[in-house]
Image: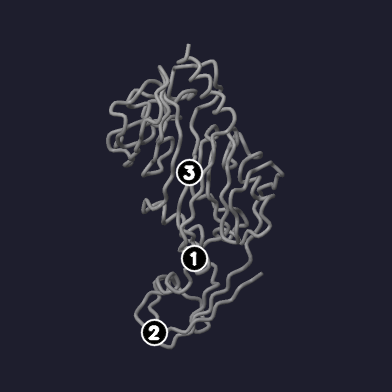
Amino acid sequence: MTQKHLLTVESGADRLDRYLASHLPQLSRSRLQTLIHDELVRVNGRPGKPALRLKAGDGVEVVVPPPVSVEMEAEAIPLEVVYQDAHLLVVDKPAGLTVHPGPGHPRHTLVNAIMALCTDLSGIGGELRPGIVHRLDKDTSGLMMVAKNDAAHQSLSHQLKEREVEKGYLALVVGTPRPHEGVIDAPVDRDPIHRQRMAVVPGGRAAVTRYRVREVLGGFSLLEVSPATGRTHQIRVHLASVGHPIVGDVVYSRRRVPFLDRQFLHACSLAFRHPTTGERLAFTSPLPQDLQAALREARALVAG
C-alpha cells in the first residue's frame, strides 16, 4: 500500500536529504535518495533536490510506493525459526544451505525459504525481500538474524558496524592453540594469489577474533570463538593463519578426517538489541547432530 508523509519544517537551514533522514528514520538513506530522484519528494508542491535548503514553514510531502516484487522464488524449504515478530526473525540455518541466490545457485537458498515463510515482509530498499544483515558460509550452521523492513535493517546493520552484536561459535580445530585463550588481530582481505579465497593480508580490512579452548581432544581442540568483526571467512582464515585450521574445512585446511564431511563451525549464540523496543535479545543453538557425532568420534580417538 502506498504511504504518504506530510511534514512541516519547524526551523530552516537544513538540507532536504538530511531533514528526511532525521524525520523518517524508518527509511534508509539510499531509499530516500531514490524517492527524491523519482520526484516522489515535493517541497511546497515542487520536486525537491537532495541539497535543497529548507526554510521554516516549508511543506514536505513524501510518497512511498509499495515494495515491488523481485524475481526471487519463494520455496517451501524446511527452516527452524527461533524467534519472529513484525520486525525481524532469527533462524537456525542448517549446513549446506546457501544464504543468498547468486551465480551457480539461483534457487534453494535461505532467502528463497524466508520468502515462503514470511507473509509480512514490508520490503528492504523498496524491494519485497528479506534483509540479510549478516551471513554464514554455506557449510556453517547456526543462528542468523534477518530484517523484515528498512528500519530493522538499518538498526541491526548499525549494531553490527558498532560491534554491539555478540556472536558466539563452536569450532573443532587441528591441534591446540597456545595460549588456551587469546585474541587474533590480523587484517583479512582477498587472497592476492588465489582470488576465490580470503587471507591475512597486510593492509587488509581490520579483523579481530577471540577464542578460548573448551576441550582438548588429542590432536584436536574444541574452541569457543567470538568474532568482534564480520569479515568474509574471518574465523576460518584467522584460525588457519595461526596453524589451527577448522576440522573439515576443504578450503583452508589440508587435514582430512574420516568422521566429518563439512567444516566443524557452528554459530551457537547470538545477542543484540531489538531494533524497535531496544530490548536485549539473546539466543542459543545446540550443536547439530552431525557435529555432535563428530565430537563423539574425536573423543573416542582420545579414549583409544
- The crowding category of the residue bearing disc 2, from other C-alpha atoms within 10 Å (few below 14, some 14 to 19, many at least 20), is some
Residue 208, given in percent of the width and then of the height, sits at: 33, 40
Q: Amino acid at mark 3?
A: Ser
Of the numbered discs 2 and 1, the one sitting upstream in the chain is 2
Task: Please name the residue shown 63% across and 66% down the image.
Answer: 66
Q: What residue would you read off at disc 3?
A: 269
Q: What residue would you read off at disc 1?
A: 277
Q: Amino acid at mark 1?
A: Thr
Image quadrant assignment for residue 213: top left
Residue 54, given in percent of the width and then of the height, sits at: 40, 80
Image quadrant assignment for residue 255: top left
Residue 41, given in percent of the width and then of the height, sits at: 52, 74
Task: Please name the residue shown 54% across and 26% down the image.
Answer: 262
**Is 186 situated above or below 163?**
above
**Is 161 situated above or below 38?**
above
Q: In what element is the residue under mark 3?
A: strand
Of the numbered discs 3 and 2, the one sitting upstream in the chain is 2
Q: In what element is the residue under mark 1?
A: loop
Residue extending furthest toward the right? 76
Q: Which mark is residue 55?
A: 2
Task: Please name the residue shown 65% across and 60% down the image.
Answer: 120
Q: CA distance from mark 2 to mark 1?
A: 33 Å
Q: Amino acid at mark 2?
A: Lys
Closest to the observer, 258 or 202: 258
Viewport quadrant of the N terminus: bottom right
- The crowding category of the residue bearing disc 1, from other C-alpha atoms within 10 Å (few below 14, some 14 to 19, many at least 20), is few
